[in-house]
């Protein structure tokens, strides 16, 4: 390489910035100090205080009693039934008649240990949160025997313990 063709790097001021100053670079070859001023720390402090205030005023839903809509969502959109409606259902009723009587079908179905087909309905007015903060409610299990008739009705408290 010929000595006259060497490209010399531009000089950059490498002195430390004064307090409240930083380096703003437009490109890789230039650096000039920028004064941040007194307002920047005040603005950052105000922003921090605003964030703290918003965080403190936000509702912690895990301690609030859940709404009926939240419980319904937790039970896969199965509507809550009243305690009276659950009590009035008598043994021997069919699943179809139960659905008509309660006005809706439950999507929560399972087979219990005795082999009965059971459906679960959450009970309105018993909304609570479990130990994980999830919405729960007391439940009524309606269990149908092999003939398709209601053979058992069980109520579970659904409390947080």
Image (cartoon, rainbow, N blue to C red):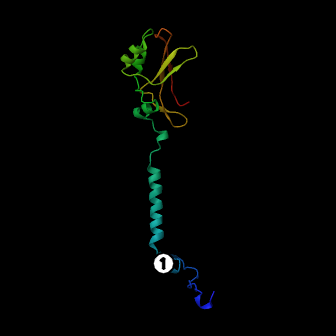
One can see residue 74 in this view: yes
Q: Quadrant of the C terminus?
A: top right
Give 86 or 117, whichever is nearer the viewer: 117
Q: Residue at x 46, y 70 (%)?
A: 40
Instruction: Give the residue at the far front of this rendering.
Output: 1
Instruction: Give the residue at the far bottom of this rendering.
Output: 4
Residue 152: percent from left, percent from top: 50, 13
Give 122 or 47, whichever is nearer the viewer: 122
Residue 70: percent from left, percent from top: 43, 35
Q: Residue at x 47, y 20 (%)?
A: 119
As displayed, is residue 74 above or below residue 4? above
Residue 93: percent from left, percent from top: 42, 10
Dividing the picture into quarters, in which one does residue 106 lie?
top left
Task: Give the crowd class for mark 1: few <14, some 14-19, many >=20 residues within 10 Å.
Answer: some
Residue 48 as seen in the image, left or right of residue 104: right
Dividing the picture into quarters, in which one does residue 125 lie?
top left
Question: How many numbered circles does the render carry?
Answer: 1
One can see residue 21 in this view: no
Q: Which residue is mark 1?
A: 34
As displayed, is residue 44 above or below residue 143? below
Instruction: Say what secondary structure mark 1 lies in.
Output: strand
Residue 130 as seen in the image, left or right of residue 89: right
Q: Quadrant of the N terminus?
A: bottom right
Q: Residue at x 46, y 74 (%)?
A: 38
Residue 34: percent from left, percent from top: 48, 78
């Amino acid at each position: 390489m010929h000595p006259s063709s060497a490209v010399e790097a531009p000089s950059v001021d490498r002195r430390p910035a004064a307090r409240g100053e930083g380096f703003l670079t437009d490109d890789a070859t230039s650096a000039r100090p920028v004064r941040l001023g007194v307002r920047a720390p005040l603005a950052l402090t105000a922003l921090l205080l605003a964030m703290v205030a918003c965080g403190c005023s936000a509702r912690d839903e895990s301690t609030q009693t859940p709404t009926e809509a939240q419980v319904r969502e937790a039970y896969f959109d199965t509507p809550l039934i009243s305690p009276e409606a659950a009590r009035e259902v008598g043994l021997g009723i069919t699943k179809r008649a139960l659905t008509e009587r309660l006005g809706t079908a439950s999507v929560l179905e399972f087979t219990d240990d005795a082999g009965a087909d059971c459906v679960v309905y959450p009970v309105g007015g018993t909304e609570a949160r479990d130990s994980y903060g999830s919405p729960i409610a007391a439940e009524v299990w309606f269990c149908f025997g092999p003939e398709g008739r209601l053979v058992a009705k069980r109520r579970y408290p659904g409390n947080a313990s």
